[in-house]
Image (tube, grey):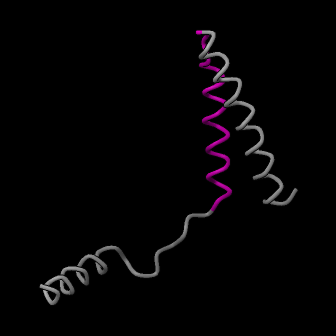
Amino acid sequence: MSTYNLMKKLYREIDSLNEEIDMRIEKRLSYKVLARRHKYLMEELRSLDPQPVPIVSRGIMNRLAQYVSVFLL
């Protein structure tokens, strides 16, 4: 199964799980097991979706912003 299809499947399952959790909340029932399943699915989804790697580090960008702000005053 391709990554795209797997992500699509996970999104569908999360959506249906969210609906079921909402129904249980309205009926004031426990949704502890469903919440664990939701957490597991979200972790799987995050592991498939790579986080972008910044080209320039945050420290350099902060330092650059400080210098620019001095010149704009």
- Residue situated in front as seen by the camera: 36 or 31: 31
Residue 21 picture location, percent across and down:
65, 23
Residue 44 counted in the magenta span = yes
Position of the N terminus by quadrant: bottom right
Image position of 43 with respect to 47: above or below: above
Please give the name of the residue rendered at 56% of the width and 64% of the height, measured from the top-left corner: 51
* Nearer to us in this view, 3 or 14: 14
Give the vertical position of 3 relative to 56 (above or below).
above
Does the segment drawn in magenta span residue 32? yes
Q: Nearer the viewer, residue 49 or 27?
A: 27
Quadrant (top left, top right, bottom left, bottom right) of the C terminus = bottom left
Farthest residue, direction top? 28
Spot the residue most to the front: 73
Which region of the structure is painted magenta? 28-49
Q: Is residue 24 left or right of residue 59?
A: right
Looking at the image, residue 71 sits to the left or right of residue 21; the answer is left
Q: Main secondary structure of the magenta part?
A: helix
Residue extending furthest toward the bottom:
71
Looking at the rendered structure, the number of numbered marks drawn on it comes to 0
Place residue 11 in its image quadrant. Answer: top right
Residue 12 placement (x, y as % from top left)? 77, 42
Which residue is located at x 79 percent, y 51 percent?
A: 8
Q: Position of residue 17 (x, y in %)?
A: 71, 30
Residue 67 at what x, y percent from top left?
A: 18, 86
Residue under the image location 54 percent in, 69 percent down: 52
Q: Residue at x 67, y 49 (%)?
A: 45
